[in-house]
Amino acid sequence: MLRQMLAVAVMCGAMQIAYAENWTPILKFQRESYNSYESDTATMTETKLLNDRRKIYEYTAVALSKLETPDFSAFSEEAVYDAFWAVFDGYAVDKVWLKELKNRIAELSGGEVQLRGSSSIHFNVRVRGPAEYLILKKGKSKTRIILGPYVSPVIFNN
């Protein structure tokens, strides 16, 4: 219990050591603000992260519009994980983001490829964790994919 309370305190930017279950602070450290260098670095890092996310989402749409597995080798594993974790809220994918992905795939394929929702019962593999089970459809061909916030976020399941 104490470890959990300490971990929460550290994650919130404050370090507190307490007696057992009593939250009487003995030592408290709180960062008040960043100096200008740290602030500029943080802003640049956030901007790079957002740009990487956009590129990763575009790579995903382009590959899926061709019925291919996306190649994320141009990005770090951390960037790929972060990009897909950002669109999952707990166990569910952000519906607005998913709709944008579906629209982008349709646009890139000239309307030939459709991304549709599905149920996990139609898949040979199930993910223990956040995942979206989808069908890529081109003509009469159907390809099952699993999308999730992982280092390998797109899994083809045929």
Image: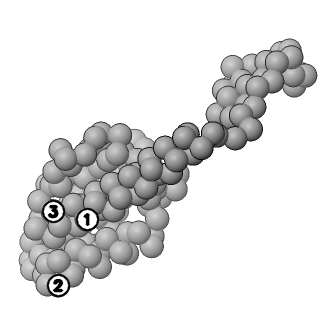
Element under label 1? helix
Looking at the rendered image, the disc whose residue lies closer to the viewer, 3 or 1, is: 1
Q: CA distance from mark 2 to mark 3?
A: 15 Å
Q: For the N terminus, which image quadrant? A: top right
Q: Is residue 109 left or right of residue 152?
A: left
Q: Is residue 113 above or below residue 88?
A: below
Residue drawn at x 41%, y 69% as measured from the top left: 97
Question: Quadrant of the rendered structure where residue 96 is?
Answer: bottom left
Can residue 10 be seen? yes
Q: Is residue 22 left or right of residue 32?
A: right
Tell me whether the residue at label 2 lies in contact with that at label 1, contact meaning CB atoms closer than 8 angstroms.
Answer: no
Neighbours of disc 3 within 10 Å: few (<14), some (14-19), many (20+) = some
Q: CA distance from mark 2 to mark 1?
A: 17 Å
Label whose residue precedes the other's in the sequence (3 or 1) = 1
Residue kind at label 2, given as amino acid type: Gly
Tell me whether the residue at label 2 lies in contact with that at label 3, contact meaning CB atoms closer than 8 angstroms.
Answer: no
Q: Nearer the viewer, residue 125 or 136?
A: 136
Residue kind at label 3, given as amino acid type: Ala
Label whose residue precedes the other's in the sequence (2 or 1) = 1
Residue occupied by mark 1: 58
Label whose residue precedes the other's in the sequence (2 or 3) = 3
Can residue 130 be seen? no
Residue occupied by mark 3: 63
Q: Nearer the viewer, residue 35 or 77?
A: 35
Tell me whether the residue at label 3 lies in contact with that at label 1, contact meaning CB atoms closer than 8 angstroms.
Answer: no
Residue occupied by mark 2: 111
Residue drawn at x 74%, y 38% as measured from the top left: 32
